[in-house]
Amino acid sequence: MNAGGLFSCLALPWISHLDMANLTLGLGLPEQSVLQPAWDYLLQYYQAELRSPLFPVVISVSTYFLMVTLYTALDLLAPSWPTLNRYKLHPDRPVTWENIWTTLGLTAYNHLVYIFPAAVGQWLWRPPIPLPPDAPSLMGFLLGILGCTVMFDFQYYLWHLLHHRVAWLYRTFHVVHHQYLQPFSLVTQYLSAWELISVGFWTTVDPLLLQCHCLTAWGFMVFTICVATEDHCGYDFPWSLHRLVPFGLWGGPPKHDAHHRMPGTNFAPFFSHWDWLGGTNLVPTTPTEDTLVTEGLKGSRDK
């Protein structure tokens, strides 16, 4: 979801409006943010880079390619590494070089045609971003990322549901992403331009709506990229986030894999509650017969 780099983050003061100092003192926490030393260091040595409209682009693109490089290396190692391969959701269907070049090709095209020109435009026409002297509190930082994640989850659930229920939207924009029934990390941004821009818009606007500190906004951007890549990675590791979040509240790779096989289910990108409420939640199982894949292909035309 590094399309967030299409839109620069504005640095707005965050939870100071809620008198965070009183809140932290009431909880017995230090008044000065534990993030302040790190923020001071960044301001002292990297302020020019942080103020640049290009910085959100650089951090989002670099995070995405770092994540997909890691998972792609695992994909290439898995067929000859049984200990690793047993964590794959589809251990009998390895990722091929053809898969990698096809998905990487569209990703590179989207970056060159859409992200790069938008980044250059921002660099030419937008002034440097002002940076606040104070870092967000640790609680403010974490709550800000959580708040943005909850908001984005709701937005994308509605957007995703709409693009599956309206046949024209699915055929015109979203069908590209569903060309792979068993996703792997590079499928994360195997997207149409419309979907890429939509996701990037929400990733950037949500921290502004919640008046997040720019450090929180950047943290949210990195978090969403990491989580989105994990959702598509095709692995179910013991340390995966859906195993750490209790009560099945987090979807994770198994549920998103099930969505690609049965596209009428599991529309939410992160949490599970909207699918529970909407009757679209599916507890995933690993397919063992081609009939399930056939059903998944039929599901891709759901209206």
Image (cartoon, rainbow, N blue to C red):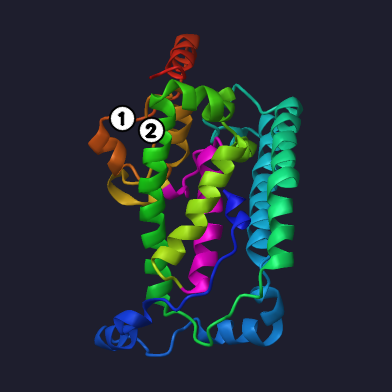
Asked which quadrant contains residue 15, the reply is bottom left
Residue 46 position in % (x across, y down): 69, 80
Name the amino acid, label 2: Leu
Measured as percent of width and height from the top left, residue 3 is found at 60, 50
Q: Nearer the viewer, residue 41 or 84?
A: 41
Q: Which mark is residue 161?
A: 2
- Which-is-in-front pick, marks 2 and 1? 2
- Residue at 56% across, 52% down: 225
Q: Identify the mark at residue 280; answer none if there is no mark.
A: 1
- The answer to whether residue 230 is visible is yes
Q: Looking at the picture, does residue 125 appear above or below residue 85?
A: below
Of 291 and 205, nearer the camera is 205
User: Residue 166's spot in the image, x, y percent?
Assistant: 41, 25
Residue 183, quarter of the rendered image = top right
Residue 171: x and y in percent read 52, 22
Q: Secondary structure at mark 1?
A: loop
Q: Which residues are drawn in magenta?
A: 213-241
Q: Is residue 238 on the magenta stretch?
A: yes
Q: Which three-letter amino acid code belongs to the residue tagged 1? A: Thr
